[in-house]
Amino acid sequence: MQALTLPPGFFDRDPVRVARELLGSTLVHVLPGGERLSGRIVETEAYDCPRDPACTAGRFHAARSAEMATVPGHWLFWSTHGHPLLQVSCREEGVAASVLIRALEPLEGRARMLNHRPVTRERDLTNGPAKLVYALGIVPAEVRNTPVDRPALHLFAPAVPLPDAEVAVTARIGIREGRTLPWRFLIRDNPWVSPGVPSMDLTGGAG
């Protein structure tokens, strides 16, 4: 059965649902020479500014919120400590919402990824949002604000949706406000999930 490319319309809804359903999808970057680099999405986070304190707290984010308010299903980037983080816009135009792709399990082109981002432990290749951007050779200026179904950078839906038993849900990582919202999704026991610690666990303890 041929995999289906996810269209922009897939993202025209609640980013929390999108983040959950993106798990198991395949992110594909086609290099200028035609080589394919790809990875299975094993971790995501949702940001939904109309109900998300993280979007209005401190420096998070007049600029980020404005960028997220574009039409749904377009590639966006945050910059954290000078590193680009890949996200996809959600909801209708004018509403700031997105999903952050936090980690991949490498599939095609591992040798090329290691050239792009040499690491001692292979599991460190794509187990973080900036790491996967560098490993896949994604240049933000070339794809920012372009549709998610463009030939150079696109997503394939999983052949079979992941059952809830295979998915863990936690609070997000690296935020101060909205830190108890259960909006981080990851494939349970997958070694490629990022090593980040949730900002606060869902029982109220500090992380």
Image (spheres, rainbow, N blue to C red):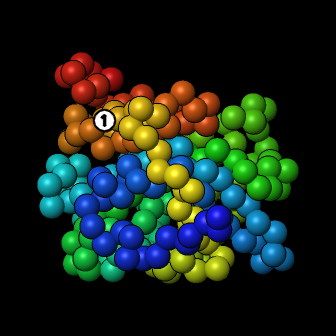
In-front residue for pair 67/15: 15
The picture places residue 195, in percent across and down from the top left corner, at 53, 30
Residue 158 is at least partly visible in this image: yes
Image quadrant assignment for residue 120: top right
Which residue, given by chain and number where applicable, does mark 1 sit on? 171
Considering only vertical position in the picture, is 190 above or below 28?
A: above
Residue at the spot 31% in from the left edge and 55% down from the top edge: 17
Type of amino acid at the residue the image marks with label 1: Ala
Task: Find the residue positioned furthest to the left.
Answer: 51
Q: How packed is label 1: few (under 14 Cα within 10 Å), some, or many (20 or more)?
A: many
In the picture, measured across the screen, residue 18 lies left or right of residue 154, that is: left
In-front residue for pair 56/146: 146
Residue 116 is at least partly visible in this image: no
In-front residue for pair 30/129: 30
Where is the N terminus found, in terms of image quarters?
A: bottom right
Q: How many numbered dots are placed on residues in this image?
A: 1
In the picture, measured across the screen, residue 84 lies left or right of residue 48, that is: right
In the picture, measured across the screen, residue 41 lies left or right of residue 136, that is: left
Residue at the spot 36% in from the left edge and 41% down from the top edge: 184
Considering only vertical position in the picture, is 207 above or below 119?
A: above
Considering only vertical position in the picture, is 132 above or below 138?
A: above
